[in-house]
Image (cartoon, rainbow, N blue to C red):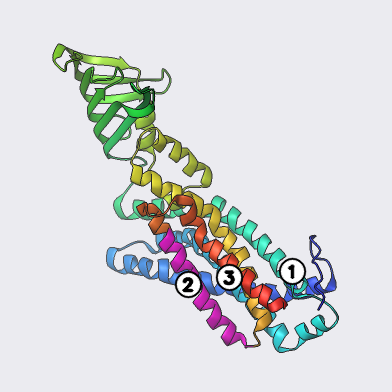
Amino acid sequence: MAFGLPRFSFPSSVLDRYIISEIMAPFLFGVGLFSSLGFAVGVLFDLVRRVTEFGLPLSVAMQVALLSAPQFIAYAFPMSILLATLMAYSRLAADSELIALRSVGTSVYRIVFPAVIISLAVTVLTFLFNDVVVPRANYYAALTLEQALTGDRPHFQENNIFYPEYGEIVDEQGQHRQVLKRLFYAEQYDGNAMHNLTVIDRSEGTVSQIITSESAQWDPGRNHWDFFNGVIYLLSSDGSFRNILRFEREQLQLPSTPFDLAQRVRDNTEMTIAEARAYLKLLDQGGDPQERRKIMVRLHQKVSFPFACLIFGLVGAALGTRSQGGKATSFAISVVMIFCYYTLFTTTGALGVAGVLEPIPAAWLTNVLGLVLGGGILLQAAR
């Protein structure tokens, strides 16, 4: 049997348009169905409870509901392309249209090609939607809900701002090592000033000074910190106190990173890729390693998740060419595959956050397995 190679251009033949038209209707149906189910389970029930039990205004609940919808629409895109391709190709197989196409020399690869093209288009749409629309909508939904329930939501970290600054040294063996250079801790932050601060300076290799202060403010115009009502303890190289200086106001040239870190309170679902990368740079300068690992995994998942559309499109088309089941069978297969994919995707992500897997494998392993599965089914169908 001869295998024709697909043309790698935008589908324009009668066959391409016909198959795409068969896919689009169930795809739009799937987007509406899956996003509605996810929205009802993930948001609607909780909002109804907040309205009835906590007195959340109905207008606020409706606003939060609208802002929460984009996230579930993004989740629905991969599910919908799987359902659509599976239904479309199963229908073509059941009506013997695939047999007719194969009889005139059209290969399975050529038949599946329109599904791959439309899956790529949905992949791009999902990526843009998931990075441009969803993070901002999630942020404003959380902000609106928090303001309605507890008043104005602080746009900063209020307690325990902790920042270790590291520097590189060359030890006696000539090896480069990262060591603690300075430790910054503030007990509270009110959005204007930090309070009850302690700064331990090890920039000279040992603890050379310890600074305590009632409050401190970052001056962005002059690029320095203003410390108020504090004490500077100067230490000798052997650890003994050399001098004690009390001050009412002292200007210190310290990094702005503690201030920058305190401003970042967005959840990873509320950050775009660019914002997540900027946050990672701050964490690289000295932040919670667990938080850094979590953001790294979520950042890679933001990139890998849209490619589920391509994987599902390939798997659905490949399975559809081998199946002659009806819509109920296609829907059942879709539900099982969606459950398996999202379970594995969530599990590998959790393993990445826990440090069991590296961030890249944690984010991409599910897609790789899906691609292998889809490719294997397609190869068998083409024989």
Quick check: 238 above or below 217? above
Residue nearer the viewer, 274 or 234: 234
Q: Are marks 2 and 1 in contact (CB under 8 Å)?
A: no
Amino acid carrying label 2: it is Cys
Q: Position of residue 54 (x, y in %)?
A: 28, 63
According to the picture, the residue beneath numbered tag 1 turns out to be 114
Give amino acid for label 1.
Pro
Tell me if I can see residue 210 in this picture.
yes
At 66% across and 82% down in the image, what residue appears? 322
Q: Which mark is residue 340?
A: 2
* Distance between the alpha carbons at the discs numbered 2 and 3: 13 Å
Q: Residue 99 vs residue 201: left or right?
A: right
Residue 126 is inside the magenta segment:
no
Q: Is residue 28 visible?
A: no
Range covered by the magenta-colored residues = 325-348
Secondary structure beneath dot 2 equals helix
Position of residue 109 relative to residue 228, above or below, is below
- Tag shown at residue 373: 3
User: Which quadrant, please, contains the N terminus?
Assistant: bottom right
Question: In x, y percent, where is residue 107?
Answer: 78, 75
Which of the marked residues, 1 or 3, is nearer the chain's N terminus? Answer: 1
